[in-house]
Amino acid sequence: MTRTVYVNGEYLPEAEAKVSIFDRGFLMADAVYEVTSVLDGKLIDFEGHAVRLKRSLDELQMAEPCTKDELLEIHRKLVEVNEIDEGLVYLQVSRGSDGDRDFVFPSAETKPTLVLFTQNKPGLADSPAAQKGAKIISIEDIRWGRRDIKTTQLLYPSMGKMMAKAAGCDDAWMIEDGHVTEGTSNNAYFVKNGKIVTRPLSNEILHGITRKAVLRMAAEAQMEVEERLFTIDEAKEADEAFTTSASAFVMPVVEIDGVALGDGTPGPIAKRLREIYLDESRKAAI
Ligand code: PMP
Protein backbone atom coordinates (compact mmCIF):
# COMPACT_ATOMS: atom_id res chain seq x y z
CA MET A 1 0.00 0.00 0.00
CA THR A 2 1.36 3.42 -0.96
CA ARG A 3 1.59 5.76 1.99
CA THR A 4 -0.61 8.85 1.86
CA VAL A 5 1.01 11.97 3.31
CA TYR A 6 -0.23 15.50 3.94
CA VAL A 7 1.43 18.62 2.51
CA ASN A 8 -0.07 22.10 2.76
CA GLY A 9 -3.72 21.19 2.46
CA GLU A 10 -3.35 18.15 0.21
CA TYR A 11 -3.39 14.41 0.83
CA LEU A 12 -0.99 12.81 -1.67
CA PRO A 13 0.83 9.56 -2.39
CA GLU A 14 4.27 10.02 -0.78
CA ALA A 15 6.08 10.07 -4.14
CA GLU A 16 4.03 13.06 -5.28
CA ALA A 17 4.50 15.22 -2.19
CA LYS A 18 6.75 18.26 -2.78
CA VAL A 19 8.30 21.08 -0.75
CA SER A 20 10.37 23.97 -2.19
CA ILE A 21 14.17 23.68 -2.12
CA PHE A 22 14.08 27.23 -0.66
CA ASP A 23 12.01 26.10 2.31
CA ARG A 24 13.71 27.33 5.49
CA GLY A 25 13.08 23.98 7.12
CA PHE A 26 15.37 22.43 4.48
CA LEU A 27 17.96 25.24 4.33
CA MET A 28 18.16 26.29 7.99
CA ALA A 29 16.32 23.76 10.17
CA ASP A 30 13.88 26.65 10.73
CA ALA A 31 11.15 24.20 11.62
CA VAL A 32 9.46 22.56 14.59
CA TYR A 33 7.93 19.12 14.87
CA GLU A 34 5.86 16.74 16.97
CA VAL A 35 5.59 12.96 17.01
CA THR A 36 2.33 11.50 18.28
CA SER A 37 1.98 7.80 18.98
CA VAL A 38 -0.92 5.72 17.72
CA LEU A 39 -2.21 2.74 19.70
CA ASP A 40 -5.35 0.81 18.72
CA GLY A 41 -5.71 3.27 15.82
CA LYS A 42 -6.04 6.20 18.27
CA LEU A 43 -3.86 9.18 19.10
CA ILE A 44 -1.97 9.26 22.41
CA ASP A 45 -1.99 12.65 24.19
CA PHE A 46 -2.87 14.70 21.10
CA GLU A 47 -3.73 17.62 23.35
CA GLY A 48 -0.25 17.65 24.93
CA HIS A 49 1.42 17.68 21.53
CA ALA A 50 -0.87 20.43 20.21
CA VAL A 51 -0.12 22.64 23.22
CA ARG A 52 3.65 22.13 22.90
CA LEU A 53 3.52 22.77 19.14
CA LYS A 54 1.81 26.11 19.77
CA ARG A 55 4.50 26.98 22.34
CA SER A 56 7.35 26.07 19.94
CA LEU A 57 5.74 28.19 17.19
CA ASP A 58 5.24 31.15 19.55
CA GLU A 59 8.84 31.01 20.79
CA LEU A 60 10.05 31.24 17.18
CA GLN A 61 7.42 33.81 16.11
CA MET A 62 6.21 31.36 13.52
CA ALA A 63 2.61 31.43 12.32
CA GLU A 64 0.22 28.62 13.16
CA PRO A 65 -0.48 26.69 9.95
CA CYS A 66 -4.06 25.83 10.94
CA THR A 67 -6.33 25.37 13.94
CA LYS A 68 -5.98 22.61 16.54
CA ASP A 69 -9.21 21.00 15.31
CA GLU A 70 -7.90 20.94 11.75
CA LEU A 71 -4.66 19.36 12.97
CA LEU A 72 -6.62 16.68 14.80
CA GLU A 73 -8.64 15.98 11.69
CA ILE A 74 -5.47 15.62 9.54
CA HIS A 75 -3.91 13.26 12.11
CA ARG A 76 -7.04 11.13 12.19
CA LYS A 77 -7.46 11.00 8.43
CA LEU A 78 -3.82 9.91 7.90
CA VAL A 79 -4.18 7.19 10.55
CA GLU A 80 -7.34 6.00 8.84
CA VAL A 81 -6.23 6.00 5.19
CA ASN A 82 -2.86 4.44 6.05
CA GLU A 83 -4.55 1.86 8.28
CA ILE A 84 -2.28 2.50 11.27
CA ASP A 85 -3.10 0.39 14.29
CA GLU A 86 0.24 0.95 16.11
CA GLY A 87 2.65 3.57 14.92
CA LEU A 88 3.39 7.28 14.80
CA VAL A 89 2.23 10.49 13.19
CA TYR A 90 5.09 12.89 12.40
CA LEU A 91 4.16 16.56 12.02
CA GLN A 92 6.48 19.34 10.90
CA VAL A 93 5.87 23.06 10.51
CA SER A 94 8.56 25.18 8.88
CA ARG A 95 8.68 28.90 8.29
CA GLY A 96 8.23 28.22 4.59
CA SER A 97 9.91 30.21 1.87
CA ASP A 98 9.44 33.32 -0.20
CA GLY A 99 11.48 31.88 -3.03
CA ASP A 100 15.09 32.63 -2.08
CA ARG A 101 17.65 32.10 0.68
CA ASP A 102 18.06 34.85 3.27
CA PHE A 103 18.94 34.97 6.98
CA VAL A 104 16.19 37.52 7.52
CA PHE A 105 12.80 35.94 8.18
CA PRO A 106 10.49 36.10 5.16
CA SER A 107 7.56 38.53 5.18
CA ALA A 108 4.60 37.86 7.49
CA GLU A 109 2.46 36.84 4.49
CA THR A 110 4.73 33.86 3.81
CA LYS A 111 2.79 30.69 4.56
CA PRO A 112 4.34 28.12 6.87
CA THR A 113 4.88 24.67 5.38
CA LEU A 114 2.87 21.94 7.08
CA VAL A 115 3.83 18.31 6.48
CA LEU A 116 2.48 15.20 8.20
CA PHE A 117 3.14 11.54 7.57
CA THR A 118 2.54 8.27 9.37
CA GLN A 119 4.97 5.52 10.33
CA ASN A 120 3.57 2.04 10.74
CA LYS A 121 5.12 0.33 13.80
CA PRO A 122 3.38 -2.93 14.62
CA GLY A 123 4.39 -4.10 18.10
CA LEU A 124 5.22 -0.58 19.31
CA ALA A 125 3.67 -1.13 22.74
CA ASP A 126 4.78 -4.74 23.20
CA SER A 127 8.36 -3.98 22.26
CA PRO A 128 11.18 -6.53 22.73
CA ALA A 129 13.55 -3.57 23.32
CA ALA A 130 11.54 -2.55 26.39
CA GLN A 131 11.64 -6.11 27.73
CA LYS A 132 15.42 -6.18 27.39
CA GLY A 133 16.08 -2.62 28.52
CA ALA A 134 18.47 -0.13 26.93
CA LYS A 135 22.23 0.14 27.27
CA ILE A 136 23.39 3.72 27.17
CA ILE A 137 26.61 5.67 26.95
CA SER A 138 27.20 9.22 28.15
CA ILE A 139 28.36 11.95 25.76
CA GLU A 140 28.94 15.66 26.00
CA ASP A 141 25.89 17.85 25.28
CA ILE A 142 26.95 20.31 22.59
CA ARG A 143 23.47 21.32 21.35
CA TRP A 144 22.17 24.89 21.19
CA GLY A 145 20.66 26.61 24.25
CA ARG A 146 16.93 26.46 23.42
CA ARG A 147 16.30 22.73 23.69
CA ASP A 148 12.84 23.48 25.09
CA ILE A 149 11.79 24.41 21.55
CA LYS A 150 11.19 21.25 19.55
CA THR A 151 13.13 22.19 16.41
CA THR A 152 14.27 19.83 13.67
CA GLN A 153 17.96 20.50 14.48
CA LEU A 154 18.57 16.83 15.18
CA LEU A 155 22.06 16.33 13.78
CA TYR A 156 23.83 16.02 17.13
CA PRO A 157 21.19 13.72 18.68
CA SER A 158 21.49 11.62 15.51
CA MET A 159 25.31 11.54 15.88
CA GLY A 160 24.83 10.60 19.54
CA LYS A 161 22.76 7.57 18.56
CA MET A 162 25.49 6.58 16.09
CA MET A 163 28.15 6.92 18.82
CA ALA A 164 26.00 4.65 21.00
CA LYS A 165 25.65 2.13 18.18
CA ALA A 166 29.40 2.15 17.55
CA ALA A 167 29.89 1.34 21.27
CA GLY A 168 27.45 -1.59 21.00
CA CYS A 169 24.76 0.33 22.92
CA ASP A 170 21.27 1.62 22.21
CA ASP A 171 21.30 5.29 23.12
CA ALA A 172 23.21 8.16 24.72
CA TRP A 173 22.55 10.50 27.64
CA MET A 174 24.06 13.95 27.29
CA ILE A 175 26.05 15.80 29.94
CA GLU A 176 26.51 19.54 30.37
CA ASP A 177 28.42 21.23 33.21
CA GLY A 178 28.73 17.88 34.96
CA HIS A 179 24.99 17.10 34.95
CA VAL A 180 22.85 14.88 32.75
CA THR A 181 20.54 16.93 30.53
CA GLU A 182 18.51 14.25 28.70
CA GLY A 183 18.74 11.38 26.22
CA THR A 184 19.18 11.95 22.49
CA SER A 185 15.41 11.69 22.01
CA ASN A 186 14.02 11.17 25.51
CA ASN A 187 14.02 12.46 29.08
CA ALA A 188 16.27 10.72 31.62
CA TYR A 189 15.54 9.34 35.12
CA PHE A 190 17.17 7.13 37.74
CA VAL A 191 15.69 5.46 40.80
CA LYS A 192 17.50 5.13 44.13
CA ASN A 193 15.90 3.67 47.26
CA GLY A 194 12.46 3.95 45.66
CA LYS A 195 12.83 7.64 44.75
CA ILE A 196 12.62 8.73 41.09
CA VAL A 197 15.05 11.52 40.20
CA THR A 198 14.88 13.63 37.02
CA ARG A 199 16.18 17.00 35.88
CA PRO A 200 13.78 19.95 36.36
CA LEU A 201 12.31 21.73 33.31
CA SER A 202 14.34 24.62 31.85
CA ASN A 203 15.61 25.78 28.45
CA GLU A 204 18.23 23.03 28.64
CA ILE A 205 15.83 20.13 27.99
CA LEU A 206 12.74 19.36 25.97
CA HIS A 207 9.58 19.52 28.06
CA GLY A 208 8.54 15.96 27.32
CA ILE A 209 4.84 15.24 26.91
CA THR A 210 5.49 11.74 28.24
CA ARG A 211 7.56 13.16 31.13
CA LYS A 212 4.60 15.25 32.26
CA ALA A 213 2.17 12.32 32.07
CA VAL A 214 4.55 9.85 33.74
CA LEU A 215 5.37 12.21 36.64
CA ARG A 216 1.66 12.73 37.23
CA MET A 217 1.01 8.97 37.16
CA ALA A 218 3.99 8.31 39.47
CA ALA A 219 2.59 10.81 42.00
CA GLU A 220 -0.87 9.22 41.73
CA ALA A 221 0.71 5.82 42.41
CA GLN A 222 2.32 7.30 45.59
CA MET A 223 5.83 7.07 44.12
CA GLU A 224 8.34 9.60 45.37
CA VAL A 225 9.71 11.99 42.72
CA GLU A 226 12.49 14.54 43.03
CA GLU A 227 13.24 17.04 40.25
CA ARG A 228 16.89 18.09 40.56
CA LEU A 229 20.17 18.12 38.66
CA PHE A 230 22.06 14.82 38.78
CA THR A 231 25.39 13.41 37.64
CA ILE A 232 26.04 10.36 35.49
CA ASP A 233 27.88 8.79 38.47
CA GLU A 234 24.70 8.99 40.57
CA ALA A 235 22.81 7.30 37.74
CA LYS A 236 25.47 4.56 37.49
CA GLU A 237 25.04 3.85 41.22
CA ALA A 238 21.24 3.78 40.95
CA ASP A 239 19.00 0.77 41.53
CA GLU A 240 17.43 1.34 38.12
CA ALA A 241 16.99 3.96 35.41
CA PHE A 242 14.67 4.69 32.51
CA THR A 243 13.79 7.16 29.78
CA THR A 244 10.47 8.53 28.55
CA SER A 245 9.36 9.60 25.08
CA ALA A 246 6.18 9.69 23.05
CA SER A 247 7.45 7.00 20.68
CA ALA A 248 9.05 4.59 23.19
CA PHE A 249 6.85 5.38 26.24
CA VAL A 250 8.78 4.30 29.38
CA MET A 251 12.01 2.52 28.40
CA PRO A 252 14.03 0.78 31.13
CA VAL A 253 17.79 1.46 31.12
CA VAL A 254 19.90 -1.50 32.26
CA GLU A 255 23.46 -0.31 31.68
CA ILE A 256 25.26 3.07 31.73
CA ASP A 257 28.82 3.39 30.35
CA GLY A 258 29.33 -0.36 30.79
CA VAL A 259 28.05 -0.41 34.40
CA ALA A 260 25.06 -2.71 34.95
CA LEU A 261 22.26 -1.25 37.09
CA GLY A 262 20.85 -3.56 39.76
CA ASP A 263 20.85 -7.08 38.33
CA GLY A 264 21.16 -5.75 34.77
CA THR A 265 17.50 -6.28 33.89
CA PRO A 266 14.62 -3.74 33.71
CA GLY A 267 13.78 -2.47 37.19
CA PRO A 268 10.39 -2.81 38.92
CA ILE A 269 9.55 0.90 38.95
CA ALA A 270 10.32 1.38 35.25
CA LYS A 271 8.26 -1.72 34.40
CA ARG A 272 5.36 -0.59 36.56
CA LEU A 273 5.39 2.94 35.12
CA ARG A 274 5.45 1.55 31.58
CA GLU A 275 2.38 -0.57 32.37
CA ILE A 276 0.51 2.31 34.00
CA TYR A 277 1.44 4.72 31.20
CA LEU A 278 0.34 2.35 28.41
CA ASP A 279 -2.84 1.44 30.23
CA GLU A 280 -3.92 5.03 31.03
CA SER A 281 -2.84 6.35 27.63
CA ARG A 282 -4.87 3.76 25.76
CA LYS A 283 -7.91 4.67 27.85
CA ALA A 284 -7.50 8.40 27.16
CA ALA A 285 -6.55 8.05 23.46
CA ILE A 286 -8.74 9.84 20.92
N1 PMP B 1 14.06 15.06 24.86
C1 PMP B 1 14.38 15.10 23.56
C2 PMP B 1 15.67 15.73 23.15
C3 PMP B 1 13.52 14.54 22.60
O1 PMP B 1 13.84 14.59 21.29
C4 PMP B 1 12.32 13.92 23.03
C5 PMP B 1 11.41 13.26 22.04
N2 PMP B 1 10.74 14.15 21.26
C6 PMP B 1 12.03 13.91 24.40
C7 PMP B 1 12.91 14.50 25.29
C8 PMP B 1 10.76 13.28 24.93
O2 PMP B 1 9.66 14.09 24.67
P1 PMP B 1 8.21 13.48 24.44
O3 PMP B 1 7.89 12.70 25.68
O4 PMP B 1 7.34 14.66 24.29
O5 PMP B 1 8.31 12.62 23.23
Image (cartoon, rainbow, N blue to C red):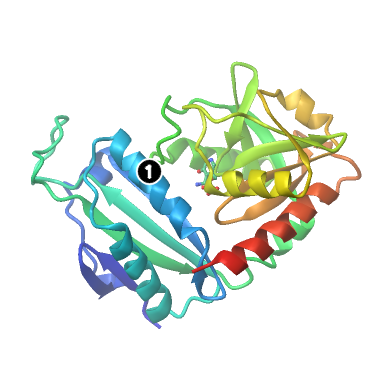
Q: Residues within 10 Å of mark 1 (few under 14, many from 20)?
A: some
Considering depth in this image, is 258 or 182 the residue closer to the camera?
182
Q: Is residue 267 visible?
A: no
Q: Is residue 159 above or below residue 272?
A: above
The residue carrying mark 1 has its beta carbon less than 8 Å from ligand 1: no
The percent coordinates of residue 30 (x first, y second) are: 28, 40
The percent coordinates of residue 182 (x first, y second) are: 59, 34
Occupied quadrant, residue 140: top right
Q: Is residue 7 above or below residue 170?
A: below
The percent coordinates of residue 274 (x first, y second) are: 71, 56
Considering depth in this image, is 113 or 193 the residue closer to the camera?
193
Relative to 157, 196 lies left or right: right
Relative to 203, 103 lies left or right: left
Q: Residue furthest bottom?
A: 1
Occupied quadrant, residue 126: bottom right
State the residue at coordinates (14%, 46%). 97
State the residue at coordinates (53%, 76%). 85
Count the marks: 1
State the residue at coordinates (24%, 36%). 61
State the residue at coordinates (32%, 69%). 5
Q: Is residue 196 visible?
A: yes
Q: Which residue is mark 1?
A: 152
- Tell me the kind of residue under disc 1: Thr
Helix, strand, or loop for circle 1? loop
Considering depth in this image, is 102 or 114 the residue closer to the camera?
114
Quadrant containing the N terminus in the rendered view: bottom left
The percent coordinates of residue 196 (x first, y second) are: 75, 37
Considering depth in this image, is 212 or 247 the residue closer to the camera?
212
Q: Residue furthest right?
A: 263
